[in-house]
Amino acid sequence: MQAHVGDVLRFTGRTVGTPEHHAIVVEVLGRNGEPPYRVRHDDGHETEICPGPGCVLETRPLRDAPPGFPSREER
């Protein structure tokens, strides 16, 4: 998995009834976009993670980058 700042990680529920949640990549700590990542979760807390098999990377188009995050053209 290779992520960039502003990409979204979608964590799917691993058991029935567990809702999926999302986190925005705020810092890439590995080389060349590889994990670990510092992410900001839906509820606002930040953690460092190495995504597992229940995680899907959603790259965001330039126009959908969150405010305050550099666009891919600025990286």
Image (cartoon, grey):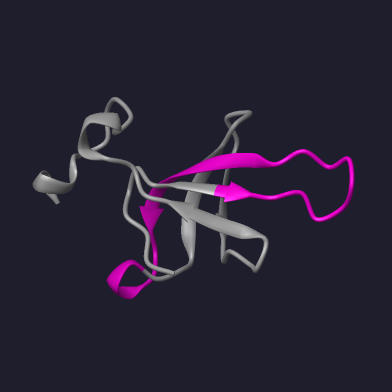
In the picture, measured across the screen, residue 58 lies left or right of residue 73, that is right
Place of residue 39 in the rendered image (x, y in percent of width and height, measured from the top left): 50, 47
Name the image quarter holding the N terminus.
bottom left
The magenta region covers 10-33
Which residue is depicted at the point 57% across and 60% down? 49
Q: Is residue 3 magenta?
A: no
In the picture, measured across the screen, residue 16 lies left or right of residue 67, that is right
Q: Nearer the viewer, residue 26 or 54?
A: 54
Which residue is depicted at the point 33% across and 66% down? 33
Which residue appears farthest toward the bottom when viewing the image?
31
Which residue is depicted at the point 65% across and 39% down? 21
Which residue appears farthest toward the right when viewing the image?
16
Which residue appears farthest toward the left when viewing the image?
73
Image quadrant of residue 60?
A: top left
Place of residue 63 in the rendered image (x, y in percent of width and height, measured from the top left): 22, 30
Which residue is depicted at the point 46% across and 68% down? 35
Place of residue 41 in the rendered image (x, y in percent of width and height, measured from the top left): 58, 38
Q: Is residue 66 above or below residue 56?
A: above
Q: Nearer the viewer, residue 52 or 38?
A: 52
Q: Is residue 11 magenta?
A: yes
Place of residue 8 in the rendered image (x, y in percent of width and height, measured from the top left): 46, 45
Counting labels gives 0
Q: Is residue 19 above or below residue 38?
A: above
Which residue appears farthest toward the front when viewing the image?
16
